[in-house]
């Protein structure tokens, strides 16, 4: 039975989509069968694995409003063991539609729409990675309801902890009201610039707060990592010998180790 991990942070620009793509691709290279779910209306995870959003017939929006079954929206990417449920800007309207439906259907009200479909897919994959939007709205609520655990990407910058308390509160509310077994899988430090003392200070602050939940792997700030999505490739395919590839492979190994593999 597969494990569902949501990457969540309501703050944009923390490396959430980059980490979703590259963790999923790295797990695939390590022989795990992986489904990446693009739950962000911007659809950056979709283009980041080489899928043309304009050519997709059905996507995660259709799944969310019950206009498609799970097998109709899964696309095989050209990367090893990696599949995706794509997204595009149409998903931005899902919030309103889901709120409207929630007034009539308690399943929608509980944020269980995504969970209902993913429960069918868990037996098909080893890992399901959800790239959440940079907000704590109804789409993220659906992800927290469906997920077994969350990874929180945190950028190594001065305001790193700002907003984290709000996010932790949202996770606790989800545990209390929607998903009692939801766990924090880990905290991932991203965009570290080794040349600054500030970045290193933030690392220590985060580690002192989250302790053993923080991954040993820290994702460095690299030009090659930011270039890769524009070529429709994870870093492991774009530049196999880069420090970015090494970092995400190490992260994937940590994830597997924490899950007893």
Image (tube, rainbow, N blue to C red):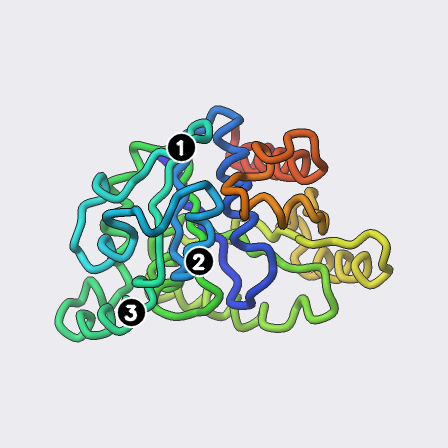
**Rendered position, 12 above or below 27:** below
Q: Nearer the viewer, mark 1 or mark 2?
A: 2
**Residue 93 shows which numbered tag?**
3
Residue at image position (28%, 66%) is 94
Residue at image position (48%, 24%) is 31
Which residue reaches farthest left?
A: 104
Tell me residue 91's x, y (percent): 31, 62
Few, some or many residues within 10 Å of mark 1 (<14, 14–19, 20+): some
Q: Nearer the viewer, residue 97 or 203?
A: 97
Q: Nearer the viewer, residue 45 or 177?
A: 45
Q: Which residue is mark 2?
A: 132
If you read the primary sequence from the N terminus, does the residue marked by circle 3 or circle 1 appear first?
A: 3
Res. 183 in view: no
Tell me residue 37's x, y (percent): 38, 48
**Mark 3 vs 1: CB contact within 8 A:** no
For mark 3, give the secondary structure: helix
For mark 1, give the secondary structure: loop
The quarter of the rendered structure image containing the N terminus is: top left
Few, some or many residues within 10 Å of mark 2 (<14, 14–19, 20+): many
Report the number of numbered marks.
3
Res. 107 in view: yes
Which residue reaches farthest top?
A: 31
Q: Nearer the viewer, mark 3 or mark 1?
A: 3
Tell me residue 29's x, y (percent): 52, 27
Residue 129 appears left or right of 70? right
Residue 208 appears left or right of 34? right
Q: Which residue is mark 1?
A: 126
Q: Quadrant of residue 217?
A: top right
């Amino acid at each position: 039975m597969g494990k569902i991990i949501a990457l969540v942070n309501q703050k944009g620009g923390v490396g959430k989509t980059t980490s979703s793509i590259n963790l999923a691709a790295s797990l695939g290279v390590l022989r795990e069968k992986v489904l990446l779910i693009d739950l962000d209306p911007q659809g950056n995870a979709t283009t980041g694995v080489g899928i043309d959003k304009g050519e997709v017939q059905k996507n995660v929006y259709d799944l969310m409003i019950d206009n498609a079954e799970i097998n109709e929206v899964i696309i095989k990417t050209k990367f090893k063991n990696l599949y995706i449920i794509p997204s595009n800007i149409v998903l931005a309207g899902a919030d309103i539609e889901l709120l409207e439906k929630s007034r009539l259907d308690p399943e929608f009200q509980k944020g269980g729409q995504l969970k209902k479909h993913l429960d069918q897919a868990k037996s098909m994959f080893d890992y399901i990675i959800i790239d959440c939007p940079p907000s704590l709205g109804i789409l993220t609520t659906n992800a927290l309801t469906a997920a077994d655990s969350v990874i929180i990407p945190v950028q190594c910058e001065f305001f790193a902890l700002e907003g984290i308390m709000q996010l932790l509160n949202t996770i606790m509310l989800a545990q209390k009201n929607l998903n009692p077994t939801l766990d924090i899988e880990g905290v991932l430090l991203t965009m570290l610039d080794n040349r600054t003392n500030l970045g290193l200070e933030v690392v220590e602050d985060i580690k002192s707060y989250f302790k053993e939940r923080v991954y040993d792997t820290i994702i460095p700030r690299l030009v090659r990592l930011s270039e890769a999505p524009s070529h429709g490739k994870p870093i492991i395919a774009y530049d196999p010998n880069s420090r970015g590839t090494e970092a995400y492979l190490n992260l994937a190994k940590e994830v597997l180790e924490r899950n007893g593999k």
